[in-house]
């Protein structure tokens, strides 16, 4: 055994006089700037435990579950369904089904499309095939309740198997409160169990306009994506086989749930965020002894999980292949291919002012509408600069923060600059139009801010006065630029004096993000302010109860009564698209309405040579009207990117071939239109006819 050589006294290192005095440097941080950085706690503090399920967290989860049960049992939801009382009034209470707030006509994708689709499914006992919605098997690819094994992966719809009123309430409350729980748990992992930052961050994210103005529809992907990330991290850091078991099952379930919620414009870009966070967290918390512990068991768990995932997805694909093929070959949106670079609908910083000054009736016309322009508040420019100062101070980067910042930058480049066509296709971003990428981009901005607040909780630096002053001036200049940008982008909609208060508010918040200002619980104060700022967004969607605005509507009930007597007959609405939407909800098999997928079997009868194929080979709002020329001509024309019109003779033999027996006119028809029909009922200006046998 060799002996260590004794170092002569003359060459032994001299101990420093004071470990509290950093060496001189040209750093912008002053000598007394750095308080000793607390060692970052190992996040997997207990064996395989990334989340500290303490009493406070258990109470939080318990309150969320309690609210879910209470609100669901009371059949309360937040759909704009009561707008049906206004769009087709039937003499009933105009506030039928409305508890408080205002139904939003702009949300017709929700109250005029998805709710009627769901009720159509319910009235047909949840089939995989539903020609009123579209061709092939639309319920397999469109996120709807269906009697199929994939319902295991659509938990927000489970309540519909009890009743439609209960199911609608279940879905809304599951999305909101389920997302709140899952997002909080994920933020707890990423912020080292900072409870208040995690809760505030989750509330801020979920109440952001980019979710609220889209009826929270993306929250289903947020739940499955969040659980996928949580289960992945537990699998990586697990020290017990029991942890591997439940984490493996959750991983398999959440990955399938995320994959089968088919909407690539969100799935692709949010999927990248999940991957960046996963890599960043593991890099930030690389503990070899934990990551490689139980390595064999972890490998087996992942292998079994992917085998289960592959089996489920294969079974689904075999049954849904024909439907997926039709969907991918549609003119819109299937063949849509993007290279980015078309910019934001509003601008990156429009959310500083939108919540104060805009609503669904008041917005700059160039910004399309309140839904399309809405996204998320961002602090990314200031955070990026601050990250540079933290790096200079501590001489290390935080991989998690850095990768999320990189994600935000890459999506910003996609939106504002675009990618080469080959890169866009290779990364699958060609399936994510910039109008839709705004939402994942905004989510990334909020996640970055929450992670930053968690990062600075135990890191205090004091900058030289000159640097502090320059940072403050920079924030002021940034907010002046944001105000100027919105004044110009709004084409005169905003007035300069209107922007003063919002500018001052966000100037203060951006200032607090700087290391210039340090005080205890600063990150919690910022989080609470953002929660208070976001709370009014609860009023974007109304508080409603039940499905009465549709299911108790006199026209709905009349059609249901006829349908029960003649359940195999097809229907067509001639005229109003809104009447068509209502008829869809009754569950009858109708020609008109919104077609999620083209119904080629029907359209080949109306258009035997497929001459107008490009008009109807799309997701579309379809409107049928009368056209009589004595030659049985049928006119099919594309009216919008997502719409087409069909004009035909109600007495056409082609309609008889399609078993179309019932006709709903939004007016009193002329005699020539009803020469082969007989009146069944008249409800105000709406008349229902049946074909003569």
Image (cartoon, grey):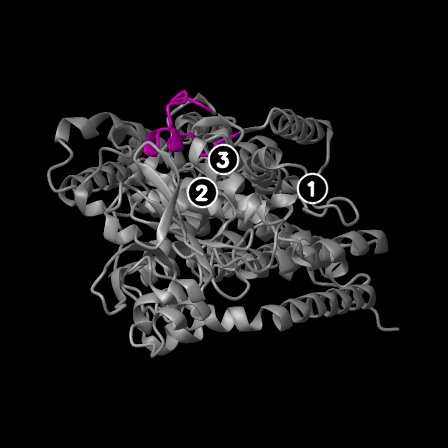
Write the residue at 40% across / 73% down: 604
Write the residue at 64% across / 38% down: 193
Q: Secondary structure at mark 3?
A: helix
Query: Which of 691 and 216 lies nearest the eye of the viewer?
Result: 691
Q: Would you say residue 93 sits in the magenta stretch?
A: yes
The earlier-in-sequence mark between 2 and 3 is 2
Distance Cα–Cα, label 2 vs label 3:
51 Å
> Residues in magenta?
77-96
Q: Is residue 114 above or below residue 330?
A: above
> Which residue is labeled 3 in the image?
557
Task: Residue 666 in the image: state x and y as whole percent.
Answer: 30, 42
Q: Residue 122 occupies which quadrant of the picture?
A: top right
Q: Secondary structure at mark 2?
A: helix
Label 1 neighbour load within 10 Å: few <14, some 14-19, many 20+: many
| Residue 382 seen from this side | no
Q: Would you say residue 653 sits in the magenta stretch?
A: no
The earlier-in-sequence mark between 1 and 3 is 1
The N terminus appears in which quarter of the rendering? bottom right
Task: Residue 15 in the image: state x and y as whole percent.
Answer: 62, 48
- Callouts 1 and 3 close, C-beta under 8 Å: no
Task: Residue 524 in the image: state x and y as whole percent.
Answer: 51, 29
Distance Cα–Cα, label 2 vs label 1:
20 Å
Query: Which of 583 and 470 lies nearest the eye of the viewer?
Result: 583
Label 2 neighbour load within 10 Å: few <14, some 14-19, many 20+: many
Disc number placed over residue 51 in the picture, else none:
1
| Residue 232 seen from this side | yes
Q: Secondary structure at mark 1?
A: loop
- Callouts 2 and 3 close, C-beta under 8 Å: no
> Which residue is labeled 2 in the image?
449
The C terminus appears in which quarter of the rendering? bottom left
Label 3 neighbour load within 10 Å: few <14, some 14-19, many 20+: some
């Amino acid at each position: 055994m060799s002996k260590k050589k004794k170092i002569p006294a003359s060459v032994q290192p001299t101990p420093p006089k004071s470990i509290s005095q950093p060496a001189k440097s040209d750093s912008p941080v002053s000598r007394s700037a750095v308080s000793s950085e607390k060692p970052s706690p190992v996040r997997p503090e207990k064996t395989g435990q990334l989340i500290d399920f303490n009493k406070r967290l258990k109470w939080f989860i318990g309150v969320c579950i309690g609210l879910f049960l209470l609100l669901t049992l009371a059949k309360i939801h937040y759909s704009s369904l009561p707008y049906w009382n206004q769009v087709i009034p039937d003499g009933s209470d105009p506030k039928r089904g409305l508890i408080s707030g205002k139904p939003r006509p702009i949300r017709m994708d929700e109250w005029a499309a998805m709710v009627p689709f769901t009720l159509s499914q319910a009235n047909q006992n949840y089939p995989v095939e539903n020609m009123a919605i579209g061709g092939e098997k639309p319920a397999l690819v469109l996120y709807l309740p269906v009697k199929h094994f994939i319902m295991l992966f659509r938990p927000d719809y489970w309540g519909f198997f009890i009743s439609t009123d209960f199911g609608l309430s279940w879905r809304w409350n599951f999305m909101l409160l389920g997302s709140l729980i899952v997002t909080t748990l994920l933020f707890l992992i990423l912020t080292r169990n900072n409870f208040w930052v995690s809760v505030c961050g989750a509330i801020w994210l979920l109440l952001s306009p980019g979710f609220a103005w889209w009826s929270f529809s993306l929250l289903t992907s947020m739940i499955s994506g969040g659980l996928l990330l949580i289960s992945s991290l537990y699998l990586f850091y697990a020290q017990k086989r029991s942890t591997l078991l439940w984490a493996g099952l959750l991983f398999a379930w959440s990955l399938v749930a995320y994959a089968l919620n088919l909407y690539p414009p969100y799935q692709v870009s949010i999927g990248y965020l999940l991957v960046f966070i996963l890599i960043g967290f593991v890099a930030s918390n690389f503990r070899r002894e934990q990551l490689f512990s139980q390595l064999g068991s972890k490998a087996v768990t992942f292998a079994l999980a992917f085998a289960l995932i592959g089996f489920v997805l294969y079974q689904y694909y075999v049954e849904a292949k024909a439907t997926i093929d039709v969907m991918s070959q549609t003119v819109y949106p299937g063949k849509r291919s993007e290279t980015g670079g078309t910019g934001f609908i509003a601008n990156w910083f429009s959310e500083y002012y939108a919540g104060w000054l805009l609503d669904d009736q008041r917005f700059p016309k160039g910004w399309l509408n309140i839904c399309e322009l809405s996204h998320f508040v961002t602090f990314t420019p200031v955070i990026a600069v601050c990250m540079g100062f933290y790096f200079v101070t501590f001489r290390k980067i935080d991989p998690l923060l850095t990768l999320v910042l990189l994600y935000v930058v890459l999506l910003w480049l996609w939106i504002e600059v675009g990618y080469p066509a080959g890169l866009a296709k290779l990364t699958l971003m060609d399936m994510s139009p910039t109008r839709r990428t705004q939402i994942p981009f905004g989510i990334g901005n909020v996640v970055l801010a929450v992670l930053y607040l968690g990062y600075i909780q135990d890191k205090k630096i004091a900058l030289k006065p000159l640097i502090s002053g320059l940072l403050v001036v920079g924030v002021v200049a940034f907010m002046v630029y944001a105000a100027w940008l919105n004044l110009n982008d709004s084409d005169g909609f905003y007035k300069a004096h209107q922007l003063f208060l919002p500018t001052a508010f966000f100037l203060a918040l951006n200032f607090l993000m700087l290391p210039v200002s340090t005080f205890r619980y600063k990150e919690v104060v910022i989080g609470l302010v953002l929660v208070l700022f976001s709370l009014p967004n609860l009023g974007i969607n109304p508080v409603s109860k039940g499905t009465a605005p549709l299911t108790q509507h006199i026209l709905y009930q009349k059609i249901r009564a006829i349908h029960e007597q003649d359940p195999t007959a097809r229907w067509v609405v001639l005229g109003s698209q809104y009447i068509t939407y209502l008829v869809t909800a009754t569950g009858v098999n109708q020609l008109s309405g919104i077609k999620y997928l083209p119904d080629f079997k029907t359209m080949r009868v109306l258009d035997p040579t497929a001459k107008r194929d490009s008009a109807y080979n799309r997701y579309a709002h379809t409107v049928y009207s009368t056209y009589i020329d004595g030659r049985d001509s049928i006119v099919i024309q594309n009216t919008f990117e997502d719409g087409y019109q069909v004009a035909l003779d109600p007495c056409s033999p082609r309609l008889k071939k399609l078993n179309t027996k019932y006709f709903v006119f939004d007016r009193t028809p002329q005699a020539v239109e009803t020469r082969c029909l007989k009146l069944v009922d008249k409800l105000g200006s709406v008349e229902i006819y049946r074909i003569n046998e």
